[in-house]
């Protein structure tokens, strides 16, 4: 059975790149009837917080990424890590190193002077003497000193590291007894039965160290997939300066989670030339063998395009829920279906939709100067005044259209002469859906009132 996991370090909000990693792992498990586990890597008690862990879970809930079983918190597993450190010490695969900070600094300085890469020199590797007093030792793994560490990466193909170049006897437990990152990851992935690890290629250099630990501990090595990073439009690694990187910020900006997931799945994965993937499509089709080797670019326009698509196709209840979370409750509006029917076609985000609907439902506080100057003049004011007279209550958009057309015919006027002036009167701007729908939505009384306000304003 395929078992995948997402293993974030809770240092802040869930980053958009983290969500993509989580999504890939989730989809791979779901596409194969496997399990997707969530592990919070919160061993760094200074940098990690409970709030950050909660923020991750909240973002998961928003996106509907369900994990299997309970969340595993590394902070509750220190005893377990100690047990495995002890096992490695006992079997001689790890050892205590009593090097003081001063000694380590001196070694570094010498190596730097010789222009060598700073590297632990193994001085306690085979130490059998009496340990120096007053020093709490760190525990180091006995890493191979020669040969290559090789693995078949699911994205990058064969990856090999020269042991001598990259490795030293790295620390698995600090002098205060706390385990290090590479150690806890291996223990947990192995004990949680993780078979496949999809993660960012910023972790690639950790992988040989982890493989050494798998071997030392006698655990089965999982399959790794290192996916290329997401870049901003300028080619630099995606960061705040390219726009929002907090997943929940996208909710606040009016994105539907399915649009964000669809967008993210395509940043580094493809299925032919397809662009639109519902979550069910993704669960069915995702195959990590089609993860891309090259980095992908975060394209805001494409995200907006996808969001517009999902806004167009979402069911109405969903839209009402989302809008009400954004502070616009349309549930009791008599024309709510017509209202969102008009705006779902023209909104890139739900925030844009909310703001446009608000600007229709609320009386304009001012008139846009450009629109006013362009469309309001003696002639249009005259037509508006007369048009106001023919508006009868409780008709449909179609009825208003017919009545308007015969009114215009009798006046020898054109629809465009009237429509823009009505828009200015009703919304204060020159943009709104078709005026007939607008009249049905707002009701003729409301439209008449707004026209008379504009007429009064024009007289001043
Ligand atoms: N905790 C690590 C991080 O947040 C991820 C570990 C892993 O995926 O192996 O970067």
Image: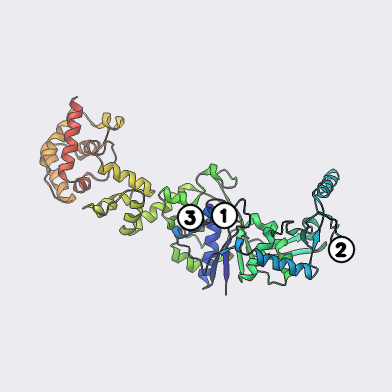
Q: Quadrant of the C terminus?
A: top left
- Residue at position x 45%, y 60% in the image: 61
**Ligand 1 is found in which quarter of the picture?**
bottom right
**Is residue 302 visible to us here?**
no
Mark 1 vs mark 3: which is more N-terminal? Answer: 1
The residue at the far top in this view is 460
Q: Which mark is residue 10?
A: 1
Across and down, in percent, residue 260 comes to 46, 55
- Between 88 and 293, the one nearer to me in the picture: 88
The part of the image, by quadrant, that contains residue 313 is bottom left
Mark 2 vs mark 3: which is more N-terminal? Answer: 2
- Between 339 and 46, the one nearer to me in the picture: 46
Q: How many marks?
A: 3
Q: Nearer the viewer, mark 2 or mark 3?
A: 2
Mark 1 vs mark 2: which is more N-terminal? Answer: 1
Q: Is residue 419 above or below residue 248?
A: above
- Residue at position x 72%, y 56% in the image: 176
Across and down, in percent, residue 148 comes to 78, 63
Mark 2 vs mark 3, CA separation in Å: 53 Å
Horizontal side, residue 25 vs residue 160: left or right: left
Residue under pointer 2 = 126
Q: Quadrant of the N terminus?
A: bottom right
Residue under pointer 3 = 263
The part of the image, by quadrant, that contains residue 120 is bottom right
The residue at the far front in this view is 134
Secondary structure, mark 1, is: loop
């Amino acid at each position: 059975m395929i078992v995948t996991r997402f293993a974030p370090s809770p240092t802040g909000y869930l980053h958009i790149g983290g969500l993509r990693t989580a999504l890939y792992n989730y989809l791979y498990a779901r596409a194969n009837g496997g399990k997707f586990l969530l592990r919070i890597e919160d061993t760094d008690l200074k940098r990690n917080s409970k709030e950050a862990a909660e923020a991750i879970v909240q973002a998961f809930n928003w996106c509907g990424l369900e994990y299997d079983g309970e969340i595993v918190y590394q902070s509750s597993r220190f005893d377990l890590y100690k047990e495995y450190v002890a096992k490695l010490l006992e079997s001689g695969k790890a050892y205590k190193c009593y090097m003081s900070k001063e000694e380590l600094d001196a070694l570094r300085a010498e190596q730097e002077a010789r222009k060598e890469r700073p590297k632990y020199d193994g001085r306690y590797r085979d130490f059998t003497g009496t340990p120096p007093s007053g020093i709490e030792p760190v525990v180091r793994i006995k890493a191979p000193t020669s040969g290559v560490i090789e693995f078949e990466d699911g994205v990058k193909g064969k990856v090999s590291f020269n042991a001598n170049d990259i490795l030293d006897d790295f620390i698995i437990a600090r002098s205060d007894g706390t385990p290090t990152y590479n150690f806890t990851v291996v223990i947990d992935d192995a004990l949680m039965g993780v078979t496949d690890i999809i993660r960012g290629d910023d972790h690639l250099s950790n992988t040989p160290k982890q493989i050494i630990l798998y071997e030392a501990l006698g655990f089965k090595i999982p399959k790794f997939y290192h996916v290329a990073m997401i870049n901003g439009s300028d080619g630099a690694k995606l960061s705040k300066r390219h726009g929002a990187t907090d997943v929940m910020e996208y909710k606040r900006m009016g994105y539907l989670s399915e649009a964000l997931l669809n967008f993210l799945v395509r940043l580094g994965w493809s299925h032919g030339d397809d662009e639109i993937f519902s979550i069910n499509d993704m669960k069915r089709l995702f195959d990590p063998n089609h993860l891309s080797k090259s980095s992908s670019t975060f394209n805001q326009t494409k995200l907006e395009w996808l969001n517009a698509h999902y806004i167009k196709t979402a069911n109405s209840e969903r839209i009402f829920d989302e809008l009400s979370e954004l502070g616009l409750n349309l549930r009791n509006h008599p024309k709510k279906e017509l209202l969102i029917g008009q705006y779902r076609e023209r909104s890139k985000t739900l925030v844009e939709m909310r703001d446009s609907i608000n600007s229709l439902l609320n009386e304009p506080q001012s008139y846009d100067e450009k629109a006013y100057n362009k469309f309001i003049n003696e002639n249009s004011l005259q037509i508006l005044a007369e048009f106001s007279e023919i508006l009868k209550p409780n008709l449909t958009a179609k009825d208003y259209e017919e009545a308007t057309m015969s009114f215009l015919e009798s006046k020898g006027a054109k629809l465009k002469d009237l429509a823009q002036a009505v828009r200015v009167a009703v919304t204060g701007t020159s943009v709104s859906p078709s005026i007939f729908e607008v009249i049905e939505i707002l009701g003729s009384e409301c439209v008449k009132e707004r026209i008379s306000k504009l007429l009064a304003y024009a007289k001043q």
